[in-house]
Structures are given as structure tokens and as C-alpha cells.
Amino acid sequence: MLFLLSPAKSLNFDAPSEEVAHTQPLFIKQATELIEILREKSPQDIARLMQVSDTLAGLNVARYAAWRPKFTAKNAKQAVLAFNGDVYEGLNAQTLTPEALAWTQDHLCILSGLYGVLRPLDYLQPYRLEMGTALDNAQGHNLYKFWGTQISDYLNTRLQADVSPVVVNLASQEYFKAVDLKTLKARVVECVFQELKDGQYKIVSFYAKRARGLMARFAALHQVTRVQQLEGFEAEGYAFDASASGSERLIFRRDLA
């Protein structure tokens, strides 16, 4: 069983992480190719391409210039500790036990526009490149064309020893679209988190992102091996709704009031 997460736009490279184990990213060649394309662009180009401010564009142009294909403790940090958005606040990897953190390394994959797939302890250097970016490359006009079947091929390799392979999707639609479902040889199960609002259950983006991280944390702490175990997730008031769920779509609901 593999769990998929999206990356975060925000990064935290302030706190040291030398004492935590690390691994090298798997798609350095592909990341290098993308960095070379990005280095050809001016801050104005980046601002238009990514729809960010001039300040953020300048920051990322500097990041592309500083990026190196060699990852060390001086220029990189473990992905699960470097990402700093709502999902990763829910996961709160800094407080996981060594056993739970090791479990994430074997069962959690972080999808990335630049790095393709990151394992939690893979080093990453600071970057911004969302999967939905329309970046021209040799394979086409966007990153979905660039990655093609590479991500699903990798997931298949990771799952090939499983008798009944399962991918639990905790990633956003933008990132999960990078997984070629035609070539993926696994059952896909989606977890959906809803809030009671104005008498109806709705997905609220901020809460849903945090809940995805909470679910990944739940899976790590309980070392989940079966889909049915996910139904026991009750963090921060959520509860599994069997009547609203299906075999491939698990619905978790709560009333914030």
C-alpha cells in the first residue's frame, strides 16, 4: 500500500535536520533537465508563468541558479521536514517516532513538479514548480507531458511485491493527474474530508489539506496495511461515514460547531 501526498508551496529550511536519516532523490536527471529550462527564464518570465509576485519570481530565479545535482546537508533538507504547508502541519513529521517515520519512507510518496516523486526522507533543494505549470519541454507543453508514465511506472515498481496493490490518494487533483491511471497497476482509493456548513457537507480546502496530513499521520502511527483500517480515522472530530462512502471513495465528515 502506498499513500500519495502533494507537496507544499511553503518551505522551512531554518531548523536543522542533520540527526534525521536522509536519502537521495530518485529523479535527479529529470529535475536537472527542468532546472536547465527554468534557468533560461527571466524573473518576468517566471512571474507570468507561475502567476506570482515579482518578489517571489526573483526568489525562485535565484533558487534555480543555486540548484545543484549534488544534494548535501548544506544545500538540501529531507522533504517531509522541508515542506511547511497545511498538509504537513497535519502530518507533523517532526513528532513522529523513528518507527513511524521509517514507515512513511516505505509507504508514503510525495508528488512533485520538479522531483517527480519524493520519498519522505529524500533530500530536496528549495524550489517552486507546481505540477500544473505550463512549462514547455521536449516532451510537450506542460509537466504532465514531461513526466508521462514515469510516475506511474515508479509506483508500479514499488507495489510489485504486493498481492493486492493499493494506492491511497491524499493528493490534490492537480498532482494526482500526473499519475497515468492507464498504466498504474493498482486499486486507487480516495479519502475525502467534509465539513458541515449551512446544513450541507462540503469540502473546505484549508481543512481538507490538513486532514490529508492527519490521515497520513494516522496511517504511519498505526502502520496501516488494509483499506478497512482507514475507517478508524477519528482525528480532530472526523468520523467515517459508511453510508456516503463507496469502495473506492472513503468519506470522513465532521461538524465544526
Image (cartoon, rainbow, N blue to C red):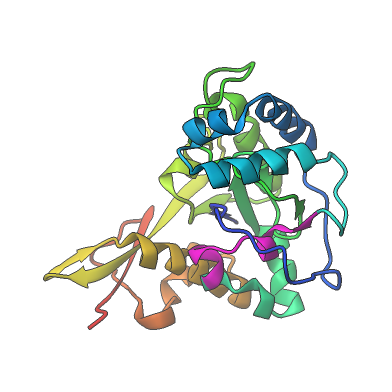
Q: Does the magenta portion include 74?
A: no
Q: Is residue 6 left or right of residue 104?
A: left
Q: Residue furthest left?
A: 199
Q: Is residue 70 above or below residue 189?
A: above
Q: Is the C terminus in the top left, top right, bottom left or bottom right quadrant? A: bottom left
The span picked out in magenta is 76-89
Q: Is residue 12 left or right of residue 172?
A: right
Q: Is the N terminus in the top left, top right, bottom left or bottom right quadrant? A: bottom right
* Residue shown at 76% from the left, 37% from the top: 65
Q: Is residue 178 visible?
A: yes
* Residue shown at 56% from the left, 66% from the top: 88
Q: Is residue 118 left or right of residue 92?
A: right
Q: Is residue 133 visible?
A: no
Q: Is residue 226 above or below residue 9?
A: below
> How many numbered marks are there?
0
Relative to the observer, which residue lies in front, 201 or 228? 201
Q: Is residue 23 left or right of residue 174?
A: right
Q: Does the magenta portion include 80?
A: yes
* Location of residue 96 in the rendering, given as x and y in whole percent from the top left corner: 67, 78
Rendered image quadrant of residue 173: top left
* Location of residue 170 in the rendering, given as x and y in whole percent from the top left corner: 48, 56
* Residue shown at 88% from the left, 43% from the top: 70
* Location of residue 134 in the rendering, given as x and y in whole percent from the top left corner: 50, 27
* Residue shown at 43% from the left, 68% from the top: 211
Q: Is residue 214 above or below residue 74?
A: below
* Location of residue 207 in the rendering, given as x and y in whole percent from the top left corner: 37, 68
Relative to the observer, which residue lies in front, 207 or 67? 67
Rendered image quadrant of residue 219: bottom right
